[in-house]
Image (spheres, rainbow, N blue to C red):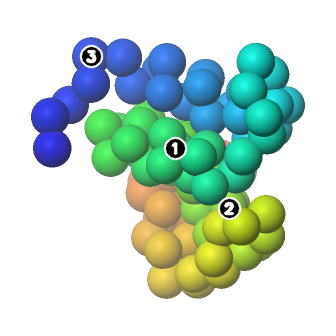
């Protein structure tokens, strides 16, 4: 996968879609996609939010505790104190 030069813009897009629905209809599945892309590029906050989505299993994102654990672990190992 080619890395984006703008992983922070991906998390902003995800936040706007998932948490606020700003400029676009609120859509957690689309947000999950953008969080995943940013997390795969090392964005720690995106990995935490991705883990949270999989941990809760709500809003159209399937509950997946294995993925949640993997992303929470990544976030914690890279300095996210909430993970």
Picture mark count:
3
Which numbered disc, 2 or 1, marks the residue that appears first in the sequence?
A: 1
- On the question of residue 28 being in view, the answer is yes
The residue labelled by disc 3 is 5
Assess whether mark 1 and mark 2 are in contact (beta carbons under 8 angstroms): yes
The residue labelled by disc 1 is 35
Mark 2–mark 1 Cα distance, whole angstroms, equals: 10 Å
- On the question of residue 83 being in view, the answer is no
Horizontal and vertical percent for residue 52?
68, 61
Horizontal and vertical percent for residue 65?
58, 83
What residue is at 61 percent from the left and 23 percent from the top? Answer: 12
Work out whether 19 lies above or below 51: above
> Position of 34 compared to 82: left or right?
left
Work out whether 78 lies above or below 68: above
Locate residue 39: give its quadrant.
top left
Circle 3 residues within 10 Å: few <14, some 14–19, many ≥20 = few
Assess whether mark 1 and mark 3 are in contact (beta carbons under 8 angstroms): no
Which numbered disc, 2 or 3, marks the residue that appears first in the sequence?
A: 3
Horizontal and vertical percent for residue 83?
63, 57
Horizontal and vertical percent for residue 60?
71, 67
> Position of 26 compared to 15: left or right?
right
Which numbered disc, 3 or 1, marks the residue that appears first in the sequence?
A: 3
Task: Name the residue at the front extreme.
Answer: 25
Q: Tell which of 10 and 79 is nearer to you.
A: 10
What residue is at 78 percent from the left and 35 percent from the top? Answer: 25
Asked which secondary structure carries label 3, the reply is: loop
Task: Name the residue at the left extreme.
Answer: 2
Asked which secondary structure carries label 1, the reply is: helix
Q: Tell which of 10 and 74 is nearer to you.
A: 10
The residue labelled by disc 2 is 53
Mark 2–mark 3 Cα distance, whole angstroms, equals: 24 Å
Mark 3–mark 1 Cα distance, whole angstroms, equals: 15 Å
């Amino acid at each position: 996968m080619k890395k984006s030069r703008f992983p922070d813009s991906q998390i902003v897009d995800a936040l706007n879609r998932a948490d606020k629905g700003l400029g676009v209809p609120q859509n957690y599945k689309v947000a999950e996609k953008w969080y995943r892309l940013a997390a795969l590029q090392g964005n720690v906050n995106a990995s935490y939010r991705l883990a949270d989505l999989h941990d809760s299993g709500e809003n159209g994102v399937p509950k997946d505790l294995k993925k949640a654990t993997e992303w929470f672990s990544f976030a914690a190992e890279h300095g996210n104190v909430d993970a």
